[in-house]
Structures are given as C-alpha cells and as structure tokens.
Image (spheres, helix red, strand yellow):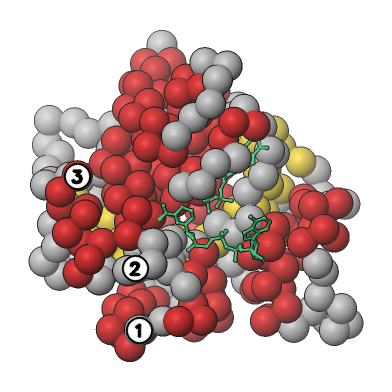
Amino acid sequence: MSEVRQWEERDAAQWIAVPDERSDKYTRGVLGVVTGSDLYPGAAVLGTEAAARTGVGMIRYLGASRPAEEVLRRRPEVVTAPGRVQAWLIGSGMDASSRPEDDAVRLRHAIEDGTPLVIDAGALDLVGDATGPVVITPHYRELAGVIARAGEDDGQAPSAADIADDPGGWALRASHLLGVTVLLKGHTTHIATPAGTHRAVTAGPPWLATAGSGDVLGGVLGALVATHEQELSGTREETLEALAALAATAAWVHGRAGERASAGGPIAALDIAGELAAVVRDLVTAGAS
Ligand SMILES: NC(=O)C1=CN([C@@H]2O[C@H](COP(=O)(O)OP(=O)(O)OC[C@H]3O[C@@H](n4cnc5c(N)ncnc54)[C@H](O)[C@@H]3O)[C@@H](O)[C@H]2O)[C@@H](O)CC1
Ligand SMILES: Nc1ncnc2c1ncn2[C@@H]1O[C@H](COP(=O)(O)OP(=O)(O)O)[C@@H](O)[C@H]1O
C-alpha cells in the first residue's frame, strides 16, 4: 500500500512558474490546445479561458473551426496559427465515438510530437499511442472506460461504482497499467504515478460538481505543464513525477478557485476560471514570503 501525500497550499506554491525580466512569451511556454467540437464548443472556451487565467506565454488553439470562433470571441489573445508548443491539452469537449477525420488528424499530430500531453475526456482512447509523457484527467466513468480498453490483468475491468469505492487504489492501478500519470477527479482528487506515488487533493466544495468544471481543470493543468518545460525534461520517471506534482497543483488551484467562486453558493464553470488569477497571485505571494 503506498503512502498518500495530501497536497497543500505550500506544496502548490512550489509549482507556479513566475516570469522574470528576461522572460518572453515563448520562454514562458506555449500551450497547444485541441479541444471542443460542434457538439461541445463551450469546453474549448472554458479550457482556454482557464489556461489564460492560470498564466502561460501563449495559447495556440488548433481545434475545429466552430469552437475556434467561440474561443476567439472570448479570448482574442489566443493564436490559431500552428507552431511549436511546450505542451498539449487535448480531448475536452470531444466525443471519441463520433470523431471527424479532421479532428483525428489534429489529435494524431499532437500525440506524436513527443511533448508532454494532458489527455482529457474524448481523447482518452488515444493514451496508448502518445509518444511524449502523459497525464490523463478522467472522472470515474471515464477511468472505467480507459481501464476496460487497456485490458485489466485478470480481464475484470472495474465499473465506475468500483472506482468510486476505491479511487486512490484504482488511480494507482491504472497508472501502473498505462505507464502514465493519472489524475482521477472527484471530491477528493487522486494523482498517481507508475512508480506508485500517490497524492490527494481535497480543496473545493461539492458545488464544483457542475458541467464544464472539469474542462476548466484541464486548462489549468495545461498552463502549468506548458510553463514547466525544464522540470519535465528529466528521465521518464522524473517527468511523470513532475507531471503528478503539477496535476496536484492544478487540482488545488481549481479547488481554491471553486471555493472563491462559490462563497457557499452555486457556481457556473466560467466563474471558476474567473477566480484563477487571484488564486495564483495569492500562491505566488505565499511562496515568496
Ligand atoms: N460546455 C461544454 O461544452 C461541456 C462539455 N463537456 C464535455 O462533454 C463530453 C461528455 O462528458 P460526460 O462526462 O458527460 O460524458 P460521459 O460519457 O462520462 O457521461 C455520459 C454518461 O452519463 C449518463 N447520463 C447522461 N445524462 C444523464 C442524466 N440526466 N442522468 C443520469 N445519467 C445521465 C449517460 O447515460 C452516460 O452514461 C466530454 O467531452 C466533456 O468534456 C462537459 O464537460 C460538460 C460541459
Ligand atoms: N462532490 C464534489 N466535490 C468537489 N469537487 C467535485 C465534486 N464532484 C466533482 N468535483 C470536481 O469538479 C470537476 C468535474 O469534472 P468533470 O466530471 O470532468 O465535469 P465536466 O465533464 O462537466 O467538466 C472535477 O475537477 C472534480 O474534481
């Protein structure tokens, strides 16, 4: 049984990259994003908004044209021209069972370029094809699907209910099975690595259980991964460990932003994104003192 490390504010404060006088948008890090679809254009807006509010040098949105229009309407800072990126966020607001050929090509480009990947929702079926280091961000139903596709050792894939009964254990098993870092969402979010490390984050209120909340989390994590190129350039094990620290930090930041957005009442997902910059600012201030 591996030991669970509770991820707290002081831990998260170590994983925020603060720009200095020599920084430019490229040295800070560029996040490539392939999310959203005609069916779910809003997920692309939520993820890019969250990444921009978390802090990143540039966002390249390289998904389909309908969500691209919505993203640009909301965030004209986003660039839709292709180019180099330091990390990818893929899959939020996509449906693997009805994937258009254009999206298949876009996703293949992302998973084959060797840079770190955050894989969410409708790209989780591609986890085995990724060439770079990966962190996946499933909820319970999605993790059940991922494990079933990967083929559990004894052929007995868990149901979502099984995973809900032992989320930490299943995050660890899935991480070992797939060779990727796993962030399993829930009231407590569990982050596991193939080496058997286990972090847990309990930071946000149950009001976070609202449509689009996970799409915001994807954007936070994408921004954090894109801005830590150096920390993600070690051995495979070191890189998956750094991805786990970044994933735990994303869950903590998302939870705290949810707490602020809620103030005891209901939350709309875009409101979580609206609180992110203040949460990051407070973390940076706390880390500096
Ligand atoms: N604004 C947006 O664009 C949003 C996009 N989203 C995207 O939507 C896609 C699907 O995500 P899901 O997590 O919903 O997919 P899942 O495939 O995990 O969930 C669908 C399951 O929920 C069940 N279900 C549907 N409606 C239900 C109801 N009223 N009561 C009980 N069970 C019900 C279905 O039978 C199915 O088993 C993802 O790509 C995700 O990123 C979501 O994040 C929501 C917000
Ligand atoms: N009961 C809860 N308490 C606190 N946080 C929750 C709770 N339920 C869900 N969350 C958080 O809300 C988000 C929901 O993500 P997800 O299920 O992917 O939703 P969506 O697909 O609609 O964006 C996750 O970050 C998860 O950790």
Does ligand 1 reach within 8 Å of label 2's beta carbon?
yes
Mark 1 or mark 3: whose residue is earlier in sequence: 3
Residue 176: give x, y in percent of width and height: 71, 68
Q: Which corner quadrant of the figure contains ligand 2?
A: top right
Q: Are marks 2 and 1 in contact (CB under 8 Å)?
A: yes
The secondary structure type at the circle numbered 1 is loop
Closest to the observer: 100 or 241? 100
Q: In this figure, which residue is indicated by the disc labeled 2?
A: 37
Crowd band around label 1 with a 10 angstrom C-alpha radius: few (<14), some (14–19), many (20+): few
Q: In this figure, which residue is indicated by the disc labeled 1?
A: 100
Which quarter of the rendered picture does the C terminus lie within?
top left
Indicate the amino acid at tag 3.
Answer: Arg
Task: Name the residue at 57% across, 16% down.
Answer: 264
Mark 2 or mark 3: whose residue is earlier in sequence: 2
Indicate the amino acid at tag 2.
Answer: Ser
Indicate the amino acid at tag 1.
Answer: Pro
Residue 225: give x, y in percent of width and height: 39, 51
Q: CA distance from mark 2 to mark 3?
A: 16 Å
Q: Quadrant of residue 138?
A: bottom right
Closest to the observer: 167 or 270? 270
Seen in the picture, residue 250 relative to 244 is either above or below; the reply is above
The secondary structure type at the circle numbered 2 is loop
Left or right: 167 in relation to 55 = right
Q: Residue furthest bottom?
A: 101
Crowd band around label 2 with a 10 angstrom C-alpha radius: few (<14), some (14–19), many (20+): many
Q: CA distance from mark 2 to mark 1?
A: 9 Å
Task: Name the residue at 34% across, 42% down.
Answer: 50
Q: Quadrant of residue 160?
A: bottom right
Q: CA distance from mark 1 to mark 3?
A: 25 Å
Q: In this figure, which residue is indicated by the disc labeled 3?
A: 74
